[in-house]
Amino acid sequence: MSFLISRSEEVAERADNFGLKISVEGEKEFKSALRDINSSSNVGENVGENVGENVGENVGEKLIKLSEKQRRIISLIKSNKYITQADISEHLSISTRTVERNMKKLQESNIITRVGSDTQGYWEIVE
């Protein structure tokens, strides 16, 4: 990192805004102070690295809140991908309509998908 300095007073003022104290008594001392700031300050480097990593990882991710019923439906599908909505209804002691509604939401959220036909297919959890 390097500085183009036209007015040492202005630079000193700006440094002061960031909590950095530098002396502008002489050109030699001023350059020395800037060198010290450059060598001891890696704030810009760290911020740039961390931001790039975090943004790259999180862009496009969508947080989906699952209800307790939806989590239990997913758990049943994990244990038996051929499970029917009627079987899920029995296991969870809820109506088949409630199962249908929750599974539709899971499909719309791209959490589960149906592979194959309604009678011969199976459920797949999208990773």
Image: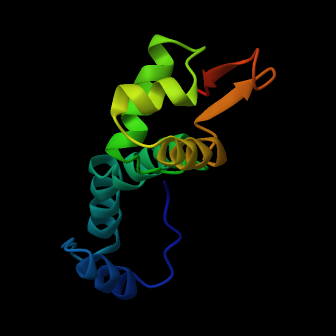
Q: In which quarter of the image is residue 25?
A: bottom left
Q: Tell me which residue sits at (61%, 49%) in the image.
A: 60
Q: How many marks?
A: 0
Q: Tell me which residue sits at (37%, 25%) in the image.
A: 91
Q: Is residue 39 above or below residue 25?
A: above
Residue 50 locus on image (x, y percent): 42, 45
Q: Tell me which residue sits at (53%, 29%) in the image.
A: 86
Q: In which quarter of the image is the C terminus?
A: top right
Q: In this view, does 81 lie to the left or right of 73?
A: right
**Can you see residue 24?**
no
Residue 87 locus on image (x, y percent): 49, 23
The residue furthest right is 117
Q: Is residue 40 left or right of residue 113?
A: left
Q: In this view, does 104 lie to the left or right of 77?
A: right
Q: Tell me which residue sits at (41%, 46%) in the image.
A: 66
Q: Is residue 18 above or below residue 44?
A: below
Residue 71 locus on image (x, y percent): 38, 35
**Can you see residue 107?**
yes
Judging depth in this view, the residue of 80 and 30 nearest the camera is 80
Q: Which colour scheme is used?
A: rainbow
Q: In this view, does 83 lie to the left or right of 116?
A: left
Judging depth in this view, the residue of 119 and 60 nearest the camera is 119
Residue 58 locus on image (x, y percent): 51, 46
Q: Quadrant of residue 35?
A: bottom left
